[in-house]
Amino acid sequence: MWYVNKSTILLFTLSILFASCSKKVGKLFEPKSPYEKYVQQLKQADIEKTAIGEEWINAGKRALQDTVSVETPFKEVGYFSEEKVRALGFRFPARRGEVILINAEWESRNPGRIFIDLFEENYEDEKSRSISSADSTLKLSYEVEEDQNFIVRIQPELLRGGKYTITISKNPSLPYPIPGRDSKTVGSFFGMDRDGGRRKHEGIDIFVPKRTPVVAISEGRISSVKENRLGGKVVLLNDLKRNYTLYYAHLDSQMVSRGERVEIGDTLGLVGNTGNAITTPPHLHFGIYTWGRGAIDPFPFVANQSADYPEIKGNAAFINILVKAKDKDTPLYASVAGNSSVSGLINFKKLLVKNTLLDIIGLSGAFYKVMLPDNEHGYVNIHQVKTIEKPFETIVARNQVSVLDYPDSTAIIKDSIQVGKHIEIYGQFNNYLWVKYQNKQGWINQGF
């Protein structure tokens, strides 16, 4: 992690300003996203060659590898410090037919942007592909074309800090075929056995009363109005936007004609139980067919998603302050899911010893997002941390004690404590103690 003081910030900001004025924008590479344009500006100003510029670019790359797995709908509130170069990555699955919705809020005392980018995760070459970026309102919408995992990266400009709130959710890309109803009326799903396992169900069955209207859920043209043995009375609608064929079957009556152009909400027919559904309760068999791939699961296209984000239960005033692990074995989780305070158990990372020093960088559900002194991050339950207002032990230096700026053997010695001075111990990490002395603070070796 890179740390700078206020004077360094001022000097560095000025260097960017002067360097930017002395460079001409090249046209050989035309970046697409705001993030790519910003990286290009750093390169043109030779900032990428500085330690902090290199660290900023590398932080963005690391965020795509060191991701946090989340369940949607997801909400996190957090803070980026001006003095720490950091980027975050959130990983989640989405299915074909769903629309990913990302909204962010950014509060900063200094003018500056925060970048929100969406990537497709790539397992083959480990290079995720950028597919979309949030606009100036920090909103992003993306319709999924293949079942896969996605990554959202969030990163502020250099030397810019502030509070962020990010939400990730998914909506169906199409309306529900039965107005006023939702996916709770689906009673049979895609891929289920039919005819004793001789074939698979190529759609979903929506059970509603007989002669309930069914409607067009996309603009398109009616390609077929016919009757067959399995589907009974059917209507086929070509979705002109996505090049799909929408299949409505078991209708009691058809109310459109072949070649007719329809709009979203136009009535196509009435629910029935014609065809091989004659012995079943009335329902609509709804399917989606694609060129070259046949039937695909229509459920993600029309299924209503929960819009309730997990309740934030932690104390927002704790964000960007140091705390310590309260219990002997405090679980650190790699990710969290839902509202439950125990749902993170499936993502267990490791146990933290009592008094482990933690920097709270965010809130999600019943968990604090924390950063350890070695920059590893994870989540701890909100009830398993405590403030460090008081030392848990006070000792007297028996000999001269070296004070480090980082809990590691390679750390720089920044000060020393003389014999006989009182040392207040507030936290620990590995074999090091975080202490305060003479209005100063730092790390000392536990075996001093």
Image (cartoon, helix red, strand yellow):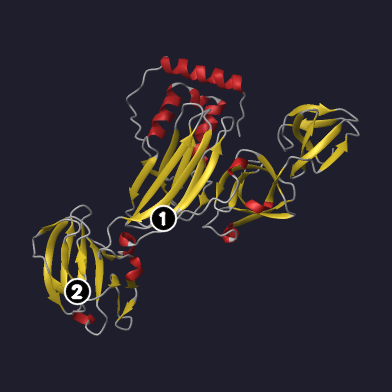
Label 2, residues with CA under 10 Å away: few <14, some 14-19, many ≥20: some
Q: Residue at x 16, y 71 (%)?
A: 234
Q: Residue at x 52, y 32 (%)?
A: 56
Label 1, residues with CA under 10 Å away: few <14, some 14-19, many ≥20: few
For mark 1, give the secondary structure: loop
**Type of amino acid under label 2:** Arg
Q: Residue at x 52, y 44 (%)?
A: 77
Q: Residue at x 48, y 30 (%)?
A: 157
Disc 2 and disc 1: Cα gap in Å? 31 Å
| Apparent side of residue 442 relative to residue 245 in the rendered image (left or right) | right
Q: Earlier in the sequence, mark 2 or mark 1?
A: 2
For mark 2, give the secondary structure: loop
Residue 357 image position (x, y, % from top left): 70, 43
Let me know if residue 326 appears in the view: yes
Let me know if residue 447 appears in the view: no
Residue 65 image position (x, y, % from top left): 51, 46
The mark found on residue 307 in the picture is: 1
Residue 299 image position (x, y, % from top left): 33, 64
The mark found on residue 211 in the picture is: 2
